[in-house]
Amino acid sequence: MNHSKPQTVAIIGGGPAGLMAAEAAATAGAKVELFDSMPSVGRKFLLAGKGGLNLTHAEAFPNFITRYGERQESLKSHLQAFDADLVREWATSLGIETFVGSSQRVFPKEMKAAPLLRAWLKRLRSLGVRFHMRHRWQGWNDSGDLMFLTPSETLSVQAGAVVLALGGGSWAHLGSDGTWPPLLESQGMEIRPLRPANCGFDIGWSPYFAGRFAGAPMKPVVARLMNPSGQEMTRRGELVITETGVEGSLIYALSAPLRDLIDLQGHAEIQLDLAPDRTQARILESLQKTHRGLSLGNRLKRAAALDAAKISLLRERVTQDECTIPKRLADAIKNLPLRLTAARPLNEAISSAGGLTLETLDDQLMVRALPGLFCAGEMLDWEAPTGGYLLTACLATGRAAGRGAARWIGRNAGL
């Protein structure tokens, strides 16, 4: 960035990372201008909070950081500087009390995103942050100025430092449309292709099963798979049947290795335990003792407490002859194989993997080759499961980039 430009921090992107970058820069004394292509900020944030805004996760940090997989070391310092406790303190400072749920997930007591966003925007405006809506970033002109397309004109903007918080590629109608990679690649930056994360997968059900049970939850269920490294992964949670396959928190927790396996070999297989609270021996004994005059459904209810969706899933994957053999049926209840053939499209995913490689950035999240340009949030090449991990990393990297941008212009102002 040109040292002669105005000592202003321009934030491009009005999601959690961009808003936190604006707060951090403005709190440090910088003049902040925030630009977003949508009519209002925080649209994905608001929609994600409709079912109860999951702010962060209260598990111990040594476990927390492992949720970021191969990128945990690169993100560690930023997440330590704005960990789950500090996220809760920040929410409290906005007048939003939080609580820790039974799964260690942290939620606002009101279970809503809108009150937090309103309080947050009020704070940002009090700090002097100015918002420019319907400004779609177009890259840079020959002079290095930022270019924006508005409903009425194309305009250029000068800034002493820039924070890009452009989001990933999921939920495009809310602003994260993933159209920005060519703009950065044109400047020589390395971008890994955006891919779906925390997503559903296709299986291919019979018309009857899909029509009857699409949308049906199954819980509790335990899923097991061998990841691409040959390690067995086991997760317990809720699985949801869709028209084409499966989704839900259990599947999202395994979506990264499932997606990677499909990329590697064209499919992935998981083993489902439909009755995790009963041993196979107990189920087998019950099936052998259950009166053969009962229907299969009633026998399965008695032996394994299966509901209609689980019973139908068994029938979908086990032949009629096998259903007459108690040992085969007990094994299927505890080890039902499902073959997943494709991840659902990126735009349907909760989040995305891929993006600007972290090796492109220094420890302040500044692009090494373009001093004064900082990047944050989901546009960076990291991924994490749902459960507060996504939002915490967006807030933490936004805070780091905003602080870095403020320091940058402060340093330049003293030159």
Image (spheres, grey):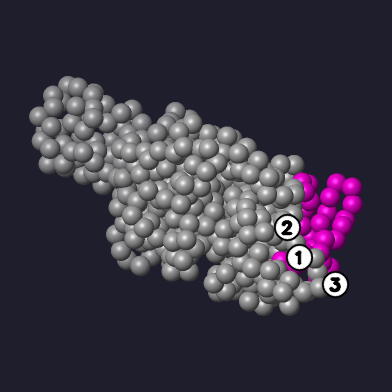
Task: Find the distance from the CA under tag 3 to the CA under tag 2.
Answer: 24 Å
Q: Callout 3, which amino acid? A: Asp
Q: Callout 2, which amino acid? A: Lys
Task: Find the distance from the CA under tag 2 to the CA under tag 1.
Answer: 7 Å
Using the rendered image of the protein, determine whether residue 264 is visible from the camera's viewpoint.
no
168 left or right of 90 in image: right
Task: Classify residue 294 by image quadrant.
Answer: top left
Residue marked by disc 1:
7
Element at badge 3?
loop
Question: Would you place residue 304 above or below residue 56 in this image?
Answer: above
Q: Are marks 2 and 1 in contact (CB under 8 Å)?
A: yes
Q: Nearer the viewer, mark 3 or mark 2?
A: 2
Checking the image for residue 142, the label placed there is 3
Residue located 52% across and 43% down the image = 93
107 left or right of 413 in image: left
Q: Callout 1, which amino acid? A: Gln
Counting residues from the start of the chain, the first of labels 3 and 2 encountered is 2
